[in-house]
Image (cartoon, rainbow, N blue to C red):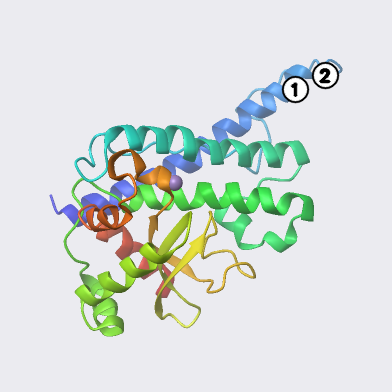
Amino acid sequence: MNPMQDNASSYSRRKFLSTAGMSVVGLTLAGKLLAGDKASTLEVSPEVSPVAAPTGFTVQPLDYSFDALEPHIDARTMEIHHGKHYAGYVNNLNKALLDSGTIFPATIEALIGDLDKLPETLRTTIRNNGGGAANHELFWNLLSPKGGGQPKGYLGNAIDAAYGSFDKFQESFAKAATSRFGSGWAWLGVNAEGALYITSTPNQDSLLMRGVVEQPGKPILGLDVWEHAYYLHYQNRRADYIKAFWNLVNWETAEELYVTATH
Ligand code: MN3
């Protein structure tokens, strides 16, 4: 089987499963609300329940096992990172939206792209937890036990054109990742003009956050440089973790993101 095709179809399948998963959660929550309301004795069949928008985002499963990225990222780190940190962002995001009675948008990306539209009291919570959820979902999809090597196709050409060579691109990206003080992310993004750029953001800020980050755009490649992403195995050696990251990059996913962002 052509590995590129395999990868693309598994990415689409994951997206579909995630959308399907959201409506299941929506129905479950709607059912619970009805069950808790004593005035209502209506029995609503989930099949005919008119739930249009999702009322809860799901924790997306990894499509590889926790130990699949070893020796570059260890199993225990992946287990805690996915099961505690990432799941925590999703759960906190859902709680903030439910508690405030905010209507759930179709996607987390839509929500964090327009933080200005949210009530001021919600903005920081959604910025941190919506950003955390979206950034990690992207990150999981950009890692693969079969990853590494160099980008080909449109993205490979664009990287060569913008940075001179893949090696020089890696150097610039690693510099952004190393010099991000404290917790944050290093990014390769595409701006409104369709040009590639390398940057980093603090905390869980996403390139999608217009009016918030210095250089908004669409993320193509992201690297989590929070200590929770590497400390168990690498301790303070962030540079070694960044070096190991190149063995895991799923360039087919990055190509898909680049083509979607620029065509
Ligand atoms: Mn993280």
Cα distance between the residues tagged 2 and 1: 7 Å
Mark 2 sits on what residue? 40
For mark 1, give the secondary structure. helix
**Horizontal and vertical percent for residue 171?**
27, 72
Which amino acid type corresponds to the residue marked 1 in the rendered image?
A: Leu
Which quadrant of the view contains residue 66? top left
- Above or below: residue 43 compared with residue 129: above
Mark 1 sits on what residue? 34
Q: Is the residue marked by circle 1 packed among few (<14), some (14-19), or many (20+) residues within 10 Å?
A: some
Q: Is 91 on the left or on the right of 195, as rendered?
A: right
Which quadrant of the view contains residue 222? bottom left
- Above or below: residue 106 compared with residue 32: below
**Horizontal and vertical percent for residue 149?**
16, 61
Of callouts 2 and 1, which one flags the residue occurring earlier in the amino acid sequence? 1
Front residue of 224/24: it is: 224
Which amino acid type corresponds to the residue marked 2 in the rendered image?
A: Ser
- Residue 107 can be seen, yes or no: no
The reply to whether dot 2 and dot 1 touch (C-beta < 8 Å) is yes
Front residue of 3/120: it is: 120
The residue positioned 78% from the left and 55% from the top of the image is 120
User: Quick one: quadrant of the C terminus?
Assistant: bottom left
Which quadrant of the view contains residue 150? bottom left
- Above or below: residue 187 compared with residue 128: below
For mark 2, give the secondary structure. loop
User: Of all residues shown, which one is farthest toward the right?
Assistant: 39
- Residue 173 can be seen, yes or no: yes
- Above or below: residue 163 compared with residue 188: below
Q: Is the residue marked by circle 2 packed among few (<14), some (14-19), or many (20+) residues within 10 Å?
A: few
The residue positioned 40% from the left and 33% from the top of the image is 80
The residue positioned 32% from the left and 73% from the top of the image is 172
